[in-house]
Amino acid sequence: MVRLKSRYLVVNYLYPVAPNASKSKDAVPDLLEFHRNTPDEFNSGVLLKAIRDGVAELFGDYGMGVVSANLKVNYHSTSTSTSIVRCPQAHYEMVWAALTFMTRLPKAGLPVVVRVVHVSGTIRKAEEDVIQRAKELILKARIA
């Protein structure tokens, strides 16, 4: 029996500030504004459907066929705006492209910048990267 090899993509969601938004005296620092919480309507099921729709739009039926069998959202946190997505090793670039071309959150309709910040061969290393990035963000937020 052949083992299915997977890649794990660590995904961050950034929320750009509108350029015409005026800064008030007690405004939230830009770092925290970019890394704000993801709406609760955007859960792992909605993310999975958005990835599938994006792959279908970009790569057609072939892309859907090779990606959808091994596609899964292993971790999704709305408080840290982070996800871990499992996808096939041979075609992880298709999932990466679908995530990169996502400009609005489904259902919520908010403008978003989706960044794949780490690609890993094991879930353990992906989780370690998520923890490390969360610690770094907390330290940056304390300074800001």
Image (spheres, helix red, strand yellow):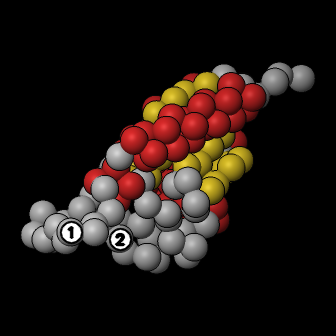
State left or right for residue 31 relative to residue 124: left
- Residue that carries the numbered disc 1 in the rendered image: 25
**Residue 46 higher or lower than 2, as above or below:** below
Task: Give the mark, 2 or 1, whose residue is nearer the N terminus.
Answer: 1
Q: Residue at x 28, y 54 (%)?
A: 30
CA gap, disc 2 and disc 1: 25 Å
Front one among 70 and 75: 75
Where residue 144 sits in the image (x, y, percent)? 35, 46
Q: Residue at x 39, y 41 (%)?
A: 143
Front one among 28 and 45: 28
For label 2, the SS is: loop
State left or right for residue 71 relative to residue 17: right
Q: Residue extending furthest right? A: 1
- Residue that carries the numbered disc 2 in the rendered image: 110
**Residue 37 higher or lower than 82, as above or below:** below
Front one among 94 and 7: 7
Q: In the rendered structure, find residue 44 and report the number of the disc placed on it.
A: none
Question: Few, some or many C-alpha atoms within 10 Å of disc 1 (few <14, some 14-19, many ≥20)?
Answer: few
Query: Would residue 98 be visible to someone looking at this image?
Result: no
Question: Few, some or many C-alpha atoms within 10 Å of disc 2 (few <14, some 14-19, many ≥20)?
Answer: some
Front one among 17 and 73: 17
The type of residue carrying mark 2 is Leu
Where residue 39 sits in the image (x, y, percent)? 51, 71
State left or right for residue 25 relative to residue 12: left
Q: Residue extending furthest left? A: 20
The type of residue carrying mark 1 is Lys
- Quick one: quadrant of the N terminus? top right
Q: Residue at x 46, y 34 (%)?
A: 117
Where residue 16 sits in the image (x, y, percent)? 27, 58
Query: Would residue 72 be visible to someone looking at this image?
Result: yes
Image quadrant where residue 78 sits: bottom right
For label 1, the SS is: loop
